[in-house]
Amino acid sequence: MSTYTRIVLQERPGAGDITPTTFRTESLPLAGLAPNAGELLVQVHWLSLDPAMRGWLNDARSYVPPVQIGEVMRAAGLGTVVQAGEGAAFRAGDLVRGTFGWTEYAVMKAKAVEKIELPKGAELLDFLGPLGMSGMTAYFGLEDVGQLQPGETLVVSGAAGSVGSLVCQMGKKRGAKVVAIAGSPEKCAWLEREVGVDRALNYKDPQWKEEMKKVGWVDVYFDNVGGEMLDFLLTRLNKGARIALCGAISDYNRKPKGLTSYLALIGQRAKLQGFIVFDYADQFPKAMKEIAGWLADGSLKRKFHIVEGLENAPSALTMLFTGGNTGKLVVKVDHGAKSKL
Ligand SMILES: NC(=O)c1ccc[n+]([C@@H]2O[C@H](COP(=O)([O-])OP(=O)(O)OC[C@H]3O[C@@H](n4cnc5c(N)ncnc54)[C@H](OP(=O)(O)O)[C@@H]3O)[C@@H](O)[C@H]2O)c1
């Protein structure tokens, strides 16, 4: 193969949806990619699709700089080292994870790449799921921000997604009553029958708010959705409740309209706290150890929604906003041959 494919940001989508002209595919000579000292050439096999990627397209202040026009779209991934530059403590064939972007090959600083060692019971893709950012987000959002206690009622929105389905299970493991909110009867059935929540409610069902009222007051709300759903859950808080504001996917493609029920935070002495998973990086090993234990004993369920082909990454990203995925959405980068990974 003499060329490789990458996908770059062509134009910002503004306050609306991603469109077919948001990204552009490019083909470049592979010979132009060579690692210098301290760098690695990585062949990318799997890419993570995350709602946060929508935010990286906006020219706005955030926890990471926006992706620039003409730059490769930022994305976390899994790959193998093809060539290691002088002084890089890696060998050809090493399995690695890093922020490789939407590309078949990437030259990376070795310091920005992490070697993967598969724990017992884990598979490679788990490093984009429970052992990756989804798992870390679920774990620290629930433990540190949610401060969930045994016997409490935990409500999780976006519950059939990557982060949400892990939060639900961690909530059960910590002894909470778990109520899941998701967008279809199939997702709710999966949550109740396989993920093991106490109750799953379909927010597209007109009766769902009435059903939620029957659940009783909420101690911890792990919010992946924001917007009107957050506004409603604010009216359902128990005294001393905590809202872990993990994400607000309902507002990523539009200008948020604002909350009308926030006064409940005063009356219920409740707390609403946003967080960013990267702030817990020094504690990731602790979480990975406990999560790896659950993978080893088979008690943690996970589902991957696999889209084949790098060229399908832009259309697959929009799936996160229409609810097309159940579990972790990933892209398998094809390389023109059946990959072992
Ligand atoms: N704070 C952090 O550090 C951090 C880190 C990682 C992720 N996050 C956030 O965590 C959330 C979940 O991320 P994920 O990777 O696990 O994605 P995901 O849940 O696997 O996928 C997104 C899901 O959101 C639901 N959704 C989309 N639009 C919606 C709407 N208008 N109303 C209600 N639900 C909607 C869809 O499911 P339905 O079919 O149920 O609608 C979709 O499947 C996102 O908000 C993300 O930004 C935050």
Image: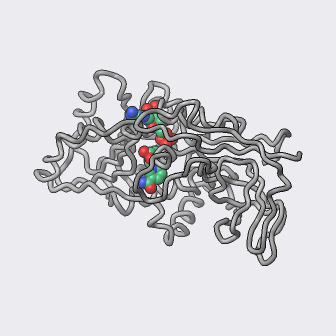
Residue visible at 82% across and 44% down in the picture: 339
> Residue 31 vs residue 289: left or right?
right
Question: Residue 82, percent across and down?
Answer: 83, 60
For the residue pair 10 and 166, the one nearer the viewer reads as: 10
Q: Which residue is situated farthest in the left direction here?
A: 267
Question: Residue 247, percent across and down?
Answer: 39, 47
Residue visible at 78% across and 54% down in the picture: 43
> Residue 182 vs residue 241: left or right?
right
Question: Residue 305, percent across and down?
Answer: 61, 37
Residue visible at 51% across and 46% down in the picture: 53
Question: Relative to residue 99, is residue 209 depicted above or below?
Answer: above
Judge whether residue 75 can be spotted in this image.
Answer: yes
Q: Which residue is situated farthest in the top direction here?
A: 206
Q: For the N terminus, which image quadrant?
A: top right
> Residue 282 vs residue 270: left or right?
right
Question: Residue 56, percent across and down?
Answer: 49, 49
